Amino acid sequence: MNIKYLSALRSGATPLAIGMALLSTAAFAQDAATTAAPQSVDCSTTPDDPSCGDTQAIVVTGSILRRTDTETVSPVTTVTQENLDQRGISTVQEGLQSLAANNGPALTNSFTANGAFAAGASAISLRGLSTNSTLVLFDGMRAAYYPLADDGSRNFVDLNTIPDDIVDRVQILRDGASAAYGADAIAGVVNIITKREFKGVRARGEAGLSDRGDASQYRLSLTAGVGDIDENGYNAYVSGFYYKSNKLMNRDRPYPFNTDDLRGVCSPDGECGSDDRINSPTATSFTGAGGPLVVRPYDPTNTTALGRFQLLNNVGCDSAYTLTAAQLAASAAAPLQTCTVDLTRKYGVIQPEIERWGVSARVTAALSDSIEGYAEFNFLQSKSAYTGLPEAISRNANAGILFPGFSTSNNAASRAPGSFALTLPVYVCANGVGDASGLNTGCNATNGTLNPNNPFAGAGQLARIQGRLFDQPTYNETRNRAYRGAIGIKGDLTDNINFDFGATAMHDDLRRTQKGYVYIANLLTAIARGTYNFVDPTQNTQEQNDFLRPTQILNATSDQVQFQGTLGADLFELPGGKLQVAVGAGARYEAVDAPSGNPDYFGPTQRYFTLNAFGTKGSRWVYSGFAEINAPVLDKVEINLAGRYDKYSSGQNAFSPKAGIKFKPIDELLIRGTWSKGFRIPSFGEANALPTTGFVTNGAGIFNDAYLAQYGCNTGATTDDNPNGYSTCPTYIRSGSYGQTTLASPNLKPERSRSFTAGFVFEPVRNFTLSVDYYNIKKTGVITQPSNSPALEAYYTGQPIPAGYTVIADAVSPDFPNATPRLAFIQSQLINANTQTVSGLDFQIDGRINLTDNIRFTSHLEASYIIKLESDLTNSGGGLERYDGTLGNFNLTAGSGTPKWHGYWLNGLQFDDNLEINTTVNYFGGYNLSAMDQGDLYKDCGQNPGYSPSGCDVPRYITFDLQTRFKVNDRFTLSLTALNLFDKMPPVDVVTYGAHLYNPIQGGQGILGRYFKVGFQADF
């Protein structure tokens, strides 16, 4: 089949992308007679590979020029459905997450279950530069942003909206590319290219299950098409799929991932973790607000405690526990008896429940001998759901919009008026008024009755109450519906002049459903009126539960509309070939409307405790002009120049130039290099969002010995010589976290970037290729929240808080009433401050050899190494912070850090056309337990609490996959896959908070353990 035109990126030109088409052009489902490459193929070095198609004039990815030369000047990774099948990967989203260049602050589906702001979505982070520095395109055109922003500020495209079964290939440009695509293409570009045509009927099915009998998934799809563009002048196809992945709980995996009891997690020196279950027998505090409901008697003025806490109910308890005499003597507030709760075992979620389905249709027609048009439509629904921890009722609300956050744990001056330690009044009445202190409810002996929830009411005493409502976990569900339509026409006007025009529109409709979250005003009202049974929550009616924890359903939308056209011409001959010139122009409209999920417009209590106030709304038009020149100045030398100008209706503008050179001194060696400038426009979330609060788990590095001395411990490791090390600190310290509240700024300027690459492709013999590419990206004016380090250091050393920060202290620990409380919130506004630089190397090796006439061996190795990733925060009050090989950037990555190495090695044996056996070795490097943005020095082990099983460094993680495919006949193929064949669990990481005791980016799907899949493909 001749492929005269390929789907191309219909935007500005860039030298990096020349020759990128023909990279495995024939994907697995395009044509029954088409054979895809056995691994990711670079057709610049293996143009004779069956997957590379013919060499007619084509428009290649990343360029607006049509050409026949397929040798690329830029580092590109191409992924086809065949590649994914060989590795046993079910979806394109999973395949992109496994890219060697993906690192650091990526957003995975599993992280959804750990409180991600952009719950229900998936995004990659090329070069570790965050999700908003990687641009995602569909057939070269922009896609709508996910309506929710990553961390409330970073807009990105959700990879779950990819219609897997019509994807021909995905091309990843691993370089800055604003000269081609405009904003956001700083770290690279992901271009999802759909099938140009499909003939016949194809059914695919797959089912998967771990060897523990859980984490099941299944997928079904059907694609049907008619017509041949070359023979009939048209092709039309329709495709549909359904995918379901069931949730997985922490309790379903082995120790220590299934519990909060870390006494068996020990360092090489013998120091072990503590039993961090709520109210465990070895706990140092039994008055935490995160345990079962407890009450403490107070005098009628609510100023003096008259006794200890006591257990109000045992709902949610794992086991009862009676405190020892020593434990009672250590705390005047501790209850005589309590109960132990393992939050991770009961409520921890590793993987949410995911359900996706969609339909797509496309018609492509030859309008003349040289002009082709197409129209395409996609609909995809993605739903993600998970349960979370039950709500605590004595706590600090997140930052509000109009008012300070309300608190039912303290009445500090920084909290909203009316804040107080939550108290059960002596009397309740039908018209009681909510009041956290219990003193101003309007109820008394004349109009009310003794409070049935207050065990001290008969003695005229108030009861301060704290704890969780263990009768009901929280529940979160996101349902995103993506609608996309695209049309295009392209062809030749004359023998030397060609054109290409495309238009697309995409709409995302997101619905969030949240249940089990306590509404502050309703809580206070229920307490004042006695309408909720805290003593025995199982006796409450559905109406009573719904009043206290009303269900919230919130809708958000995102839109993208784009028009773009190009005109190209071959001018005259140069020593190396024709001088080519192309020009283009485009316009696009983008908008996000995500209302606040927790506003305080009607008062500080007219909202939920824990839901974020985050929300944003904005729209803008972008107008662009671009051009490209390709000059083969010598037979062995080719120069490419490109530039793009973008103007935003919001007032910003940018010019992005790019230059590249390709030199081939001998047939076996290609040398290439590029230089470019780029930019990233402030996202709607950064410029217009409401306050956003994310939580960062406390580590030893943020404290100092003088501060911890108040709590009887220090920052050092616990040893015989230092028996009061950090692991002995009370749970109040070790298990605490602080809220990082981000304020948007409408005055932000675009980030600017400078990128260059240099590399070579070496083919010493046929069918063996080695490529190495160096990259260096520098961003200036990086949009960021100022480093928390200055504020943390000032607070914990008792110094004045630096300008630009607002800090809010937490409630005092009842066990240490005279100690300075831990920090609850740090608030600051986004600024253009940082300079960030990343450099590294990409490696790729491809080999193929015929062992016999019937047996072929193929090998593909792909790896990425980050040499250095650092930020200069001098302008925002910090210093130089280096992240590569550590847990940094800690806040941005949720403690997942930036491992230096990431890659995989795929080897395959093909026996005729009937049997194929593939093995994949997956590699993710280790890292040091330190983070300079948390106050550590580079690789000083500053975040290690002392009991890390691997010491200061989390080790590398290597897994082994096996996949086989057997062709039963010409129409039916079976596949068997074993992922993580040796059932190797991820390394234990005692610091990261993106998952429980393992790194969700490094561990990936490995936490599922050994996993089996069986699939089929049938062609009719």
Image (cartoon, rainbow, N blue to C red):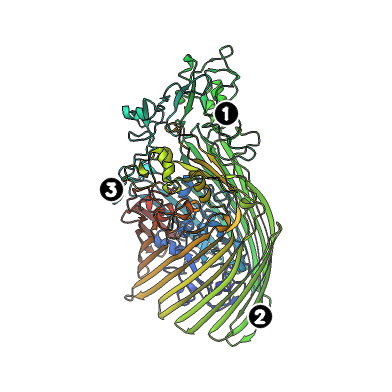
Mark carried by residue 522: 1
Asked whether, in this view, residue 315 is left or right of residue 424, the answer is left
* Quadrant of res 976: bottom left
Regarding mark 3 in the picture, which secondary structure is present there? loop
Q: Residues within 10 Å of mark 2 (few under 14, many from 20)?
A: few
Instruction: Report the amino acid beneath label 1.
Output: Asn
Regarding mark 1 in the picture, which secondary structure is present there? helix
Instruction: Report the amino acid beneath label 2.
Output: Asn
Q: How many marks?
A: 3
- Horizontal and vertical percent position of residue 354: 48, 47
Q: Which residue is mark 2?
A: 496
User: Which residue occupies 32% across, 27% down?
Assistant: 325
Instruction: Report the amino acid beneath label 3.
Output: Gly
Residues at badges 2 and 1 in contact (C-beta under 8 Å)?
no
Regarding mark 2 in the picture, which secondary structure is present there? loop
Q: Which of 491/983 is in front? A: 983
Q: Is residue 403 visible?
A: yes
Q: Which of 846/954 is in front? A: 954
Q: Is residue 628 above or below residue 1014?
A: below
- Horizontal and vertical percent position of residue 550: 56, 32
Mark earlier in primary sequence (3, 1): 3
Q: Which residue is mark 3?
A: 270
